[in-house]
Image (cartoon, coloured by chain):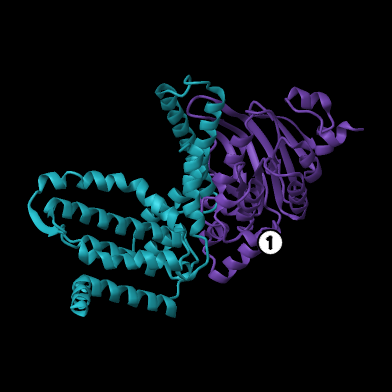
Amino acid sequence: MTFDESYFSIGRLDRLSYEDTFVHRLDSRIKVVCTMLFLFTVISFSKYEVVSLIPFFLFPVLLTTLGEIPVRFLVRKIIIVSPFAIFIGIFNPFLDTRIVAVIAGIPVSAGWLSFISILTKFSLTISAALLLIATTSFPGICHALRRLGVPAIFVAQLLFLYRYLFVLLEETMRIIRARDMRSFGKRGLGMKVAVRLIGTLFLRTVERAERIYSAMLSRGFSGDIPSLKKYQLRRPDALFAISTIAFIALFRFVPVTEILGRVIQEFFQ
Amino acid sequence: MSHHFVDFKDVFYHYPDGTRALNGISFRIVHGESVGIVGANGSGKSTLLLHMNGYLMPGSGTVTIGDVLLQRSTAADIRKRVGIVFQFPDDQLFMPTVFDDVAFGPLNLGLDEESVRERVRNALNMVNSYDLRDKPPHHLSGGQKSSVAIASVMAMEPDILVMDEPASNLDPKSRRSLITMLKTFVHTKIIASHDLDLILDVCQRCIVIRDGAVVADGASKDILSNKTLLEENNLELPLSLQRC
């Protein structure tokens, strides 16, 4: 993927968050809290758990559908980061060879089970995090964090990260374009030049930071970033929060899949 | 109010690397004047502007804004009166949405919610950008960014408006509406630019600086029609005066 393409792909995730659907309209605090709860619940399962995790896919699937997020886009994002999870779990099948189950005549070792569990947890958590970003504007998340008691200085850092990520990427894109236009074949594309480009970029960033700070000062900045946003919890927010918490609790403490399996088994007997 | 004057007396400034940017510059701008500041690249225009709200402090000499002498202790007070629109709107627009950005100044002034909203509305309407209020700055075009940057300063209702190359990113129509808007702003205006036509249109007075000192100071129509003076300063006659 060229630099230009990756830049626009980041921009796409951002653009999605400005859509207007049921999920997008929900209060950002609720979404942040529910997503956190979801993440912690998923992580809290034991390392051999797979079956009980399956019902949790309901959460990302629902958000994707209601939030009108393109599924292929989401899946591709998950695949891009998947190497991290794969490398964490890849050796489990070799290290933990205890046989724990036999499915259709094939013995399954505990290692494979924990590997699959890692992958399942990974897809659940990453998709939930991506969906939070894709359905909530980044400033919305920041204001929610501020309201939930995160110190102003961290929130300000996040806000600036978001604001200047795009400016910085555009700057990088311009530098890379300028380099590519004047480097032919392999010359000019090597490590040596890249290091200098990073240096240039760093200096420009420092200069820009100076200019931003002077612009902030000239508009009366004195340490805190004020906001006018008023948040009011409406009925859909409460509904969403209550049902999410109820379902997460249900799936966490009641072995739903097992019960469902028993019912189906009995039905066929 | 008659005391919105800007007074520079023998101001020297050199950057930490030794570059002497201001070399004993002196001038006085009184209330209601609109003054263009022109000069070659590197003549000290930007450094001069950064002194006007105390971002930089004079090495020696004095800067007086209104009745207040510029010092570390008075800088915050002076910033409330002097609004600076910087050259690059990306540096000026640091908040995640247009509304938040324009509201940043008024909120720091400690205004209540209703007046903040009203100021934001007025300022954005002034530059015809109220519809952009919920957009993040990185989704705006260059011209829209410039307009919003101007609104973000106008929302503070400054007594003195200072602009650095205000029209450099604008298409001709936006530039024209900027000029119209500047003419309606009745307070003191100080505009640094290479766009001499804009200065001729908006400013009655013009100051030429070279190597950090004033080389000419007078009515725009005299200075901007003086071909030799302009060419000595890497400038040329405004297009509107070239035709005749």
Q: Is residue A26 left or right of residue B222?
A: left
Chain B tint in image:
purple
Position of residue A208 measured from the top left corner of the image (x, y, whole percent): 50, 39
Q: Of residues A27 and B8, which is closer to you in this image?
A: A27
Q: Of residues B143 and A93, which is closer to you in this image?
A: A93
Can residue B138 be seen from the camera position used here? Answer: yes
Residue B1 position by quadrant: bottom right
Chain A tint in image:
cyan
Q: Is residue B148 left or right of residue A150?
A: right
Position of residue A190 measured from the top left corner of the image (x, y, whole percent): 42, 23
Can residue A136 be seen from the camera position used here? Answer: no
Q: In the rendered image of this protein, does residue B188 appear above or below residue B108?
A: above
Q: In the rendered image of this protein, does residue B199 appear above or below residue A23?
A: above
Residue B192 position by quadrant: top right
Position of residue A267 measured from the top left corner of the image (x, y, whole percent): 21, 79
Q: Residue furthest top?
A: A187
Chain bearing mark 1: B
Total numbered labels placed on residues in the image: 1
Q: Residue at x 20, y 51 (%)?
A: A115
Q: Residue at x 30, y 58 (%)?
A: A125
Give the labeled residue for mark 1.
B125
Position of residue A134 measured from the top left corner of the image (x, y, whole percent): 44, 58
